[in-house]
Image (spheres, grey):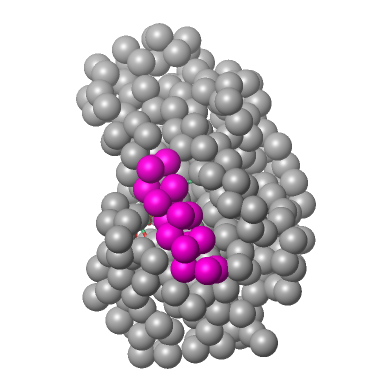
Amino acid sequence: MTKTILITGAAGQLGGRIVHHLLETRGYPAERLVVTTRDPAKLADLSAKGVTIRVANFDEEASLVSAFEGADRVLLISTDALNEPGKRLRQHAAAVAAAVVAGVSQIAYTSMPKPDPGNPVLFAPDHHGTEQVIKATGLPYTIFRNGWYQENLFMALPQALKTGRWYSSAGEGRTAYVSRDDIACAIAGALASAVDQSVTYTLTGAEALTNAEIAALTSEVTGKPIEVVNLSDEALTEGMKVAGVPEAIVPLLISFNANTRGGGFAEVTGDVKKLSGTTPQLLTAFLKANKAALLG
Ligand SMILES: NC(=O)c1ccc[n+]([C@@H]2O[C@H](COP(=O)([O-])OP(=O)(O)OC[C@H]3O[C@@H](n4cnc5c(N)ncnc54)[C@H](OP(=O)(O)O)[C@@H]3O)[C@@H](O)[C@H]2O)c1
């Protein structure tokens, strides 16, 4: 019988695309899909298509069991609560516990590449901890270690294009940027498949590039020069503060640079193509498609 798939965070950007690919790309039956959000009004369009909408807030443990009832496969999309260390792990652990009580048969989760202890990214422990909590349930699991979105480059490139300079402490480290939509398509493919055994995927782009290579490609596409200025973490921290980057975010951004420098985002796998059936979008295509927005 067709499994009932439940997706949390379905009103978010990744969740929305996963639901789109399940319905439109995979032709998954809407009556076998349950989607959750804290604000059901955001998902009214899916209700019209026959998808079941439920409220689930990982901060309200008591409500979660009924939210997950009747689901075979539950995809837990990691939350965006980055402001309080440890909060995400508590939220995710509550969701996993509820899924077990609700009797689901498989848990899937959106993690990050190489989240193991020693990863400098400040929120890596949340992902590592959640993976451990899921494995400890003894249920079959699917961990999607999502690579860095190409869309994250909107945090750096518009400013770099404006000033001609991209300040970084990532050195010669490489990142296998992947589009959010390619990740969504791959996750939809895995959820819709009949595979029931536990597996961990790392969803990356098809190439890993240094910031200097990304700057060169961006210049080629936009016709505007960008010089990458490599600094120490300390100098980049000071520079960001002077530039007005909110103080609370600076250590997080520095931790991304440190992870890039150490090769933590450099792995290239074939998992996106294996699950989606299509080659992930190259960075040049992303830059061309977003040229006007990047130039502001
Ligand atoms: N790999 C990367 O480069 C990258 C980049 C950005 C983010 N991420 C991670 O990937 C996740 C999905 O990315 P995205 O682009 O879809 O982000 P997004 O659009 O900001 O979506 C975040 C989702 O988290 C859900 N959420 C927040 N608090 C929650 C709570 N207390 N209980 C249940 N759900 C909660 C929200 O659901 P509702 O508001 O509908 O309740 C929302 O759908 C993010 O949350 C983050 O963990 C990864």
Residue at the spot 40% in from the left edge and 51% down from the top edge: 94
Please state the horizontal and vertical placement of residue 293, each as a whole percent of the image. 38, 53
**Residue 231 x/y as whole percent:** 47, 12
Left or right: 91 with respect to 113?
Answer: left
Answer yes or no: is residue 134 visible: yes
The residue most toward the front is: 101
Task: Judge whether 251 appears above or below 180 on screen.
Answer: above
Q: Answer above or below: position of 226 versus 6.
A: above
Would residue 68 be found to the left or right of residue 183 on screen?
Answer: left
Q: Nearer the viewer, residue 157 or 117?
A: 117
Residue 246's image quarter?
top left
Q: Nearer the viewer, residue 52 or 158?
A: 52
Q: How many marks?
A: 0
* Residue pictured at 67% horizontal, 87% vertical: 1
48 lies left or right of 96: left
Q: Is residue 265 visible?
A: no
Q: Residues in magenta?
A: 88-104
Quadrant of residue 161 in the image?
A: top left
Residue 27 inside the magenta-drawn segment: no
Q: Position of residue 130 (x, y in %)?
A: 51, 43
**For residue 62, side relative to residue 33 (left or right):** left
Residue 80 coordinates in the image, percent (x, y): 36, 47
Residue 166's image quarter? top left
Which residue is drawn at the image coordinates 51% and 61% (left, top)?
100
Residue at (39%, 66%) from the top-left corner?
65
Task: Report the predominant secondary structure element of the magenta stretch.
Answer: helix
**Of residues 54 and 169, the one drawn nearer to the viewer in this rendering:** 54
Residue 97 falls inside the magenta stretch: yes
